[in-house]
Image: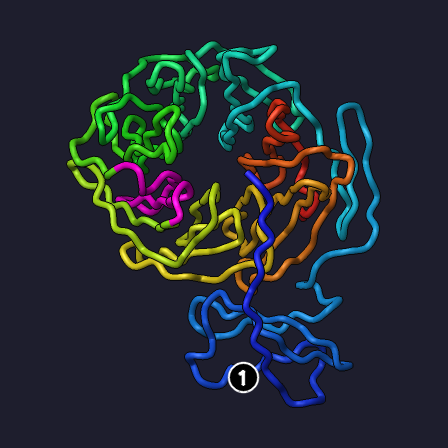
């Protein structure tokens, strides 16, 4: 993953003088408001602000320098502690704790208030295991062996069942969570990809209302692009209708009942996919010019798909997605804070401090930010939360640096 700073087209609109704060600009002809585009607007005192064209083709409010919706700034107090990192920014920084886990993937369990992290076979500790971390204290509660090179995970919507991808054996494994502790259960071999090659499960989604039906993207080792198709598996039995490989939904995220969404982040087509779940598998429709960039991840929440590069897609009509808007910057991991119109974004990059941003999903403006200048990472992924307060993500310093799990309290909460 990498930090991508995206340039945005800016169209200058003039407005009448004598406005207080920011002035909502009359966009004129409807075709001039292009969803996702930022335009300039006039502020009191001659300053220039920014407003965003929203998904309904009307402009949001004008955000002026110094407004609540502008980039947060100023100094903030830092908290220090063993294994912790202080921060700077518009809000008071919470302590960020590094957990001694070489995590490959992390997800949150809101029912039990814990994070689950997978650890690969070459790790110094907890090799080939599923590790349970208490969200409030960042303490490792237990570690359970699950199989060869565990990678991605997916949790059922009732939090009773966890599915784990075993990259080393080309299988997925069911983990029973009903007893309180994870209990590894059945392992199922994955179906072959489009060309008959064995592959491992990348992103996975447990279908709503089920515990055993999983939509997943297949990936092959040692080829580029690695994508080998998407498939639905019911307790180890693959439905026959599988999507084509090479170019397709290499990234997957959930959706409303009967749908999942995907994005091609491995090939320059950069297609966005509506995947209808049928009794026989997946029916895929490609849509263009909605999301772009390599290695962009996607997250679904409340009728929208949020991309880590800052682009947002309105999927309230799953068969006809539309661009909802775009933030003025990109990141590495995002977390919608439904039902509030807020989004958290982690942005890191070479030579730049790690930043946690609080964003407004209606105006597409930044509300606040906290910097972590002492956090030495260049990559980040999997920003998750159990309750909107306790957060976790994975960070690393680059190719030769082992991934690390970080846990913190949301500095913007309340």
Q: What residue is disc 1 on?
A: 26
Question: Magenta segment, which residues?
Answer: 245-268
Seen at 68% across and 45% down, the residue is 355
- Magenta span contains residue 375: no
Q: Would residue 97 be visible to someone looking at this image? A: yes
Could you say whether the residue bearing mark 1 is in a helix, strand or loop?
loop
User: Residue 212's x, y, as percent?
Assistant: 29, 26
**Residue situated in front as seen by the camera: 258 or 13:** 13
Packing grade of label 1 (10 A; few <14, some 14-19, many >=20) is: some
Q: Quadrant of the N terminus?
A: top right
**Residue situated in front as seen by the camera: 155 or 219:** 219
- Magenta span contains residue 261: yes
Seen at 32% across and 30% down, the residue is 218
User: Residue 276's x, y, as percent?
Assistant: 24, 46
**Residue situated in front as seen by the camera: 414 or 120:** 120
User: Residue 91's x, y, as percent?
Assistant: 75, 49
Q: Would residue 143 be visible to someone looking at this image? A: no
User: Residue 225's x, y, as percent?
Assistant: 37, 35
Q: Horizontally, is 370 left or right of 225 in the view? A: right
Q: Horizontally, is 74 left or right of 394 in the view? A: right
**Displayed quadrant of residue 187:** top left
Residue 343, placed above or below residue 223: below
């Amino acid at each position: 993953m990498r930090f991508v700073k995206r340039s945005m087209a800016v169209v200058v609109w003039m407005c009448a003088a004598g406005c207080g704060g920011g002035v909502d600009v009359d966009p004129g002809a409807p075709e001039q408001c292009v969803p996702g585009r930022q335009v300039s607007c006039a502020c009191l005192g001659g300053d220039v602000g920014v407003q965003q064209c929203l998904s309904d083709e009307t402009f949001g409010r004008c955000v002026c320098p110094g407004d609540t919706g502008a980039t947060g700034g100023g100094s903030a107090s830092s908290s220090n502690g063993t294994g912790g990192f202080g921060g700077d920014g518009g809000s008071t920084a919470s302590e960020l704790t590094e957990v001694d886990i070489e995590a490959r993937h992390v997800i949150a369990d809101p029912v039990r208030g814990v994070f689950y992290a997978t650890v690969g076979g070459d790790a110094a500790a907890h090799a080939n295991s599923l590790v349970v971390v208490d969200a409030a204290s960042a303490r490792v509660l237990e570690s359970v062996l699950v199989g060869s090179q565990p990678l991605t995970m997916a949790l059922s919507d009732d939090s009773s069942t966890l599915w784990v991808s075993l990259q080393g054996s080309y299988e997925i494994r069911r983990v029973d969570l009903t007893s309180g502790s994870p209990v590894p259960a059945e392992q199922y071999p994955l179906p072959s990809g489009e060309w008959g090659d064995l592959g491992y499960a990348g992103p996975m989604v447990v279908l709503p209302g089920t515990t055993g039906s999983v939509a997943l993207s297949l990936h092959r080792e040692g080829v580029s692009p690695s994508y080998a198709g998407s498939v639905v598996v019911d307790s180890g039995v693959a439905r026959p209708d599988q999507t084509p490989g090479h170019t397709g939904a290499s990234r997957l995220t959930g959706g409303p009942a009967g749908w999942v969404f995907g994005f091609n982040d491995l090939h320059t087509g950069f297609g966005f996919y509506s995947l209808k779940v049928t009794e026989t598998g997946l029916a895929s429709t490609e849509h263009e010019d909605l999301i772009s960039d390599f290695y962009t991840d996607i997250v679904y929440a409340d009728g929208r798909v949020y991309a880590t590069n800052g682009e947002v897609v309105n999927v309230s009509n799953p068969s006809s997605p539309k661009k909802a808007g775009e933030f003025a910057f990109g990141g590495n991991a995002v977390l919608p804070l439904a039902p509030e119109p807020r989004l958290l974004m982690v942005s890191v990059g070479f030579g730049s401090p790690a930043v946690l941003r609080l964003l407004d999903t209606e105006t597409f403006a930044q509300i606040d930010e906290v910097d972590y200048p002492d956090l030495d990472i260049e990559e980040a992924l999997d920003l998750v939360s159990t309750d909107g307060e306790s957060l976790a993500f994975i960070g690393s310093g680059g190719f030769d640096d082992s991934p690390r799990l970080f846990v913190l309290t949301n500095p913007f909460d309340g």
